[in-house]
Image (cartoon, grey):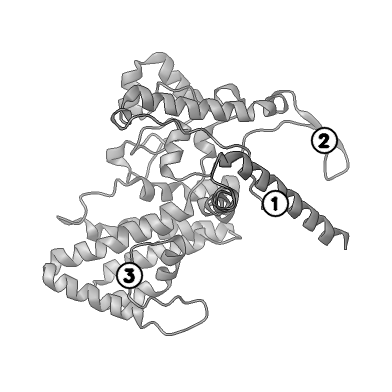
Amino acid sequence: DSVLPVAFLAIPKCEHKADKDSRFLCFRRQLFHSSLAAILRPLHPSMTEGVILKCPDGHYQRVVFCIGPYIADYPKQGLVTCTVSTWCPKCFNHPENLDDRGFHLRTEEEINELLAQHNPRVVHYSHGIVTDVVPFTAGFPYTNIHELITPDLLHQSIKGAFKDHYVDWIYLYLKHKNGESLASQIMDDIDRRISVAPSFPGLRRFPKGRRFKQWTGNDSKALMKVILPALEHWLPVKVIQCFSSLLEFCYLARRSVITKDDLGKMTSALEALHCDREIFLLPDVRDDFNLPRQHALMHYVDCIRLFGALNGLCSSITEAKHIKAVKEPWRRSSRWKALGQMLVTNSRLTKLHALHSFGIWLH
């Protein structure tokens, strides 16, 4: 209930043949940014003139507000920051050099300077900037949307780097080293080991191992707890160390309270991961590690210093709210002109929750 829906954005549709038309795609992007700008426009005076508020120390101060962290998965990050797909929305690293540990962060001032001095086509291909859209942040002061983009624990580290990358690379590695037939037998044994994990509070049972289609974030978190013993014996020490470093980094990043010592441990774990993952650089496994979701891990420590623990900035929060604010009200509606009914449902549920909270406070 700490997240509230403020608007339902329009999604323009057209004939299937125009789905890839550059003009239509530009229109969709601009509509999104124009909608956000219109929604946030009432807040503009408080960002320029400020508002007089009573502070916790009892004194009145003129407070100037600004736009806060933006929670989104990678495709939406690119849309919000006007960044070309496969580029990083936070820094200028080229898609072919994402695993370079040295990076130059993006700023609104530098991007505006590039657009003023260079041809839009050059800026698009050399810096990964979408030049045919006016971003919603253009009219708001003190707003660097590239800095405000937050790490996404769910899609970057849990389902991304861990499940979609390293877990899937295990089979490719075994296939390269042992052939397809033996690799399949080894994977069957790994699945068997996962399925016979003993019952214990906090451990998830996987009766069929990894073999089910609909993976969720909770499934990936549960697999993290049992994956290391299942890999022992079948894979070299370097691969085990690679998974160990990744899990160490993920568990530290998911803490609700993170200290300076934890940030140091995260940096060490990430450096170890970058060293150990070289074992996957094999034909038919990986040619490089220029993957946006893995590159994003490099920005975690700086983002934690800016915004605090990442548990409160994960897209799983907004996805859970999407179920409560969109899917469930839709099911309760008559399905005919449902938007108005959904808005009424959300409004009433919010008022009931406020009344319940007031009753708890009163007693």
The answer to which quarter of the image holds residue 217 is bottom left
Q: Which mark is residue 192?
A: none
Write down the residue under mark 2. 53
What's the distance in space between the residues labelled 2 and 3, CA to CA?
Answer: 54 Å
Up-down relation of residue 114 to residue 213 (above or below): above
Which quadrant is the C terminus positioned in?
Answer: bottom right
Secondary structure under the numbered disc 1 in the rendered image: helix
Q: Nearer the viewer, residue 6 or 330?
A: 330
Write down the residue under mark 3. 210
Write down the residue under mark 1. 349
Looking at the image, is mark 2 or mark 3 nearer the viewer?
3
Between discs 2 and 3, the one toward the N terminus: 2
What's the distance in space between the residues labelled 1 and 2, CA to CA?
Answer: 29 Å
| Left or right of 213 in this view: 1 | right
Q: Are marks 1 and 2 in contact (CB under 8 Å)?
A: no
| Mark 2 Cα-neighbour bin, 10 Å: few <14, some 14–19, many ≥20 | few
Looking at the image, is mark 1 or mark 2 nearer the viewer?
1
| Mark 3 Cα-neighbour bin, 10 Å: few <14, some 14–19, many ≥20 | some
Q: Are marks 2 and 3 in contact (CB under 8 Å)?
A: no
Query: Residue 312: where, in percent of width, then height?
Result: 59, 53
Identify which amino acid the numbered label 2 is placed on. Answer: Leu
Up-down relation of residue 149 to residue 362 (above or below): above
| Left or right of 41 in this view: 229 | left
Query: Residue 175: where, in percent of width, then height?
Result: 15, 65
The answer to which quarter of the image holds residue 83 is top left
Can I make out residue 90 in this image?
no
Secondary structure under the numbered disc 2 in the rendered image: strand
